[in-house]
Amino acid sequence: MSEQTATLVILGAALATFATRFGGHVVLSQFRRIHPRVGAALNAVPAAVLITLVAPSLLTGGTAEIAALAAAAVVSLRAGLMPAFLAGTAVLLVMRIFV
Amino acid sequence: MKTDILAGMRQSLSVIVSAAPFGLLFGALAVDNGMTVWQAVLMSATVYAGASQMVGIELFGQNVAPWLIVFSIFAVNFRHVLYSASIGRRFGGYNLWQKALAFFLLIDPQFAESERRIEQGKPLTLAWYLAFGLPIYVVWIAEAWLGATFGKMISNPQALGLDFLLPIYFLGLVMGFRKRTLWLPVVLASGAASMLAWKLVGSPWHVSLGALAGIALAAAAPLPKPATGTEAMK
């Protein structure tokens, strides 16, 4: 990808993101209420998209990677994003160095 | 107005601190995936959505069609449609440019803290909104520059584990949504579908195909009691 194309991708992504932030108000304020099925689908979007960036690591990753994900998942049950992230990172580093 | 500004700035501090590693990480990984320093800064300054920026640079490093990168970022940011519809009703006193600025700054913590403020019966003044949002925004841009500049000096990202930090971060985000209706079925469906698509179709289609599986499941599932599916709308 050329540097110019890359810059255009960034600006396109910026416009698309701004559209979701402004457009939601513009479009949805036209309706009295959202259909429950549409609401349920929208509600599922973030987890549905983000898990697809994790799951293939279970196929490609080694023991250290899978252990790091497991550690992050367990810690996130009790603590926030940051402790979970740090726990996963710590497990990853320790296992890559010592195992 | 002065109390609003002070309150907003005070509340922004915890968000700035907890987002800092990701702002820096974004800059470092952006350069690692082939972006220039100024492109990393441009992305933080114009897209301003952490998770989707990470998705963008992850695809950047692979040989992915440009429109698909834009589309993937759009898909990750689609949740803002709901934030926008909900919080936009409180922007009645703003003029068009103020509204545009407020919507531009509508990241997850901005939405969450704004809803909390309304819950407390306090007015969502522009002074409070900007005093909370602008410091987070400015620091986020500075972190992209710092991370990108520093990241160039990291010659062996694997030694530091930089190459696998994104999946860990994304899993943390996924776990953060676990109180939502149908979260587990959606995650299992999308996770399994993305692995299947990864094997059968290949990257990057595992993202859209995997996501579709979970979203379709959520739309087709028996509807829970009213309002749970649209709680961001209340």
Image (cartoon, grey):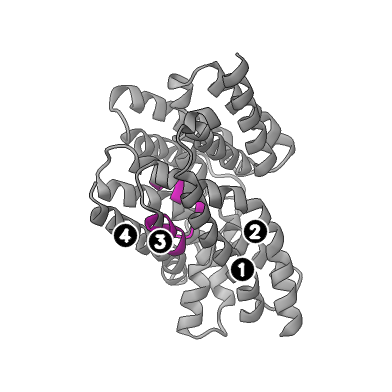
Residue that mark 1 sits on: B135
The quadrant in which residue A24 appears is: bottom left
Magenta region, residue range: B38-56
Nearer-the-camera pick, B192 or A34: B192
Pointer 4 local density, CA inside 10 Å: few below 14, some 14–19, many at least 20: many
Q: State if disc 4 and disc 2 touch (CB < 8 Å).
A: no
Please give the residue where the numbered disc 3 appears in the rendered image: B42
Pair 1/4: label in front? 1
Q: Nearer the viewer, mark 2 or mark 4?
A: 2
Circles 1 and 4: CB distance less than 8 Å?
Answer: no
Q: Secondary structure at mark 2?
A: helix
Front residue of B39 and A20 = B39
**For the residue marked with disc 2, what is the amino acid?**
Ile
Q: Secondary structure at mark 1?
A: helix
Q: Specify few, some or many for label 3: CA neighbours under 10 Å numbering under 14, 14-19, or 20 or more.
A: some
User: Residues under labels 1 and 4: Cα distance?
Assistant: 25 Å
Q: Residue at x 37, y 24 (%)?
A: B196
Rendered location of residue A90, percent (x, y): 65, 30
Residue A37 visible, this orientation: no
B184 left or right of B80 in image: right
A91 left or right, relative to B208:
right
Number of marks drawn:
4
Looking at the rendered image, the quarter that the C terminus of chain B falls into is bottom right
Q: Chain of mark 2?
A: B
Residue type, numbered disc 4: Gly
How far separated are the C-alphas under marks 3 and 2? 19 Å
Label 3 marks which chain's residue?
A: B
Read off the chain for label 4. Answer: A
Marks 2 and 1 share the same chain: yes
The secondary structure making up most of the magenta span is helix
Query: Which residue position is annotated with label 2?
Result: B16
- Dots 2, 1 in contact, CB < 8 A: yes
